[in-house]
Amino acid sequence: MLALSKLAPELVYQEMRYRKFYGDPVITRDVADSGWLSRPLLLGSLWGARETALENGVLFGAGITQVLQGVVAGDSDDDANYVGSADVWLGLDSGRAGLWPGGLIFAHIEGNWGDPVSGSGALLPVNADSIDPGLPSKFALSELYLTQALSEQVMMIIGKADWAAFVDTTFFANNERTQFLNEGLMNNAALGAFVPYTALGAMFLATPTKELAIGGGVIQNAGNATKSGFDELDVDKLTFAGALMYNPIFGKLPGSYQMLLGYTSKDSPDFAVDGRYFIEEIIGVRPTNDKEGNYALTVTASQYVWVDESVSVGRGRLPVGFGPFLRLGFTPDDRNLIDQFYSVGVGGTGIPSVGRADDHWGVGWAGAHISSDFRGLAGDLGATGLDDFEHVVEAFYNFALTPAVSISLDIQYVNPTNSDRDDLVLMGTRLQLDL
C-alpha cells in the first residue's frame, strides 16, 4: 500500500520545515539508538516505542528552541531577552497504518514563552520564532491537515496549515531552528497581507515531471494559529493563489525556484497590516483604508553552486555545500503596508574541510519598502518619522555539538523604518534540541 513517508520523505521534511524525522529511511532504529554523540534525536527510539508507532503508521517528532538575544548598540526598551518555544509534530501515514493508500494526516502543536526584544522601532520581528503561535506566550494546535495523493502526479492538501511553507521556501533561509532568526530572512513579508501564519484552506499540486510542480489553492485570509478558523470563515475573506515550483538538479547542484500569484477578496481596512508586524507599536495608531481586493507577486529562489561529493547524504536531504538565495515580493502601494520586499544572501550546510559537515551558516540582507500611500496617511494622522525602507543585515553560524544538539551565534544590524530611533546592533545565541 502506498505510504507517502516512505515514498517521499522530502514531503515530510517540508511539512515539518525540518529535514529530520524518525521514519526517514536514513534514521533507522540502530542509528537513532547510537551513542549520545552520534544519534540524530536525543530521545532515540524511546526504547522502541517510536519503532512500534512507526510500524502502525504514526510519526512523532519534537524540538525545543531557546534564544537569548539583546541590543548591544542603539536604543530599545529591552537590553537582553530570553525566549523559547517547543514544537511537537504528529503524523499518521494511512498507507503504513494499512488504512488507505497515499494519505498523511499531519498535526503541529506548539507553544512559546518569554518576551521578545521590543520597543526598537523595527517593523519586522528580530526573532521570527518568538512570535508564533502568538504573543504574549501562547499554546496552540497550529496545524491539522490531510495530504492525499490522488494519483502518481496529483496531490491534495486540505485543512489548517502554514501555507507559505509550501510556496516560499529556500535551502538556506527557511528554518528558524538552525538558520536565520530575523523575520525578514525567514519569510517573504509581502505575504503577510494574504496568508496568516496558519489558516484553513485547500491546495492541489500537480507534478507533470519530477522537477516541475504546479499548484493552485484557496486559503482563508483571517484568523490565527490559536483559533480553529471556522468562526471566521467568510467567502469575502479568501485568498486565491497559483504557484509554479521548479526544482532542477544541474549536474549534482540542486536548485529551488518558485513563483506565486495571489489575489484576496478581503477588503483592506488596515492597509493589510499583519498582526505579527509592529506598526502600531511604532506609530501609535493603525491607519485605515477601504480598498477592495488585493494582489501580489512573489519569487523565491535558491541554488547550490558547490557541493562536496565526498559527503554522503540521504535522499531528500540537503547536500553539504553552499549557494545564494533570494526573495522578491510586490503588492499595490495604495492598500499595503509593505508594497515591495527583497532579501538576498548566501548560505551553506557544513564546512567539511574542518570536519564540520553538520553545521549551518549564512549571511543576508532584507529590505521591506513601506508604501508611500501608507506613510502619507500615517502622517495625516500625526505619525511622522517613517522612512521608506527598513533594512536588515544578519549573519549566523550554527555549530552542531552533536547531530541532535546545536548552538548558534547570530548578529543583526537593523536600520528601522522609524527614523526617530537609532540603528540597532543585536547579538544572540540559540540552543536547539531535537528530541
Image: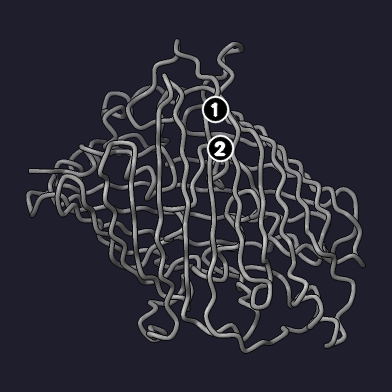
Residue at position x 35%, y 69% in the image? 201
The residue depicted at 85 percent of the width and 65 percent of the height is: 387
Q: Which mark is residue 172?
A: 2
* Residue at the image point whose x is 38% and y is 58% from the top: 108
Locate the N terminus by quadrant: top left
User: In front: 39, or 98?
Assistant: 98
Residue to which mark 1 is pinned: 349
Identify which amino acid the numbered label 2 is placed on: Phe
How far from the left and from the top, in percent, is residue 372? Answer: 78, 72
Query: Judging from the image, what secondary structure is the residue with disc 2 in?
Result: loop
How far apart are labels 2 and 1 at the CA level? 8 Å
257 left or right of 113 in image: left
Provide the secondary structure element on which disc 1 rests.
strand
Compared with 269, 250 (above or below) is above
Mark 2: few, some, or many residues within 10 Å (few <14, many ≥20)? many
Residue positioned 71% across, 59% down in the render: 368
Relative to 322, say whether 370 is above or below: below
Q: Is residue 261 above or below residue 62?
A: below
- The number of callouts visible is 2
Can residue 216 be seen here? The reply is yes
> Is residue 33 at least partly visible in the picture?
no
Left or right: 270 in relation to 263: right
Q: Earlier in the sequence, mark 2 or mark 1?
A: 2
Of the residues shown, which amino acid type is indicated by label 1? Thr
Q: Label 1 neighbourhood size at 10 Å, few (<14), some (14-19), many (20+)?
A: many
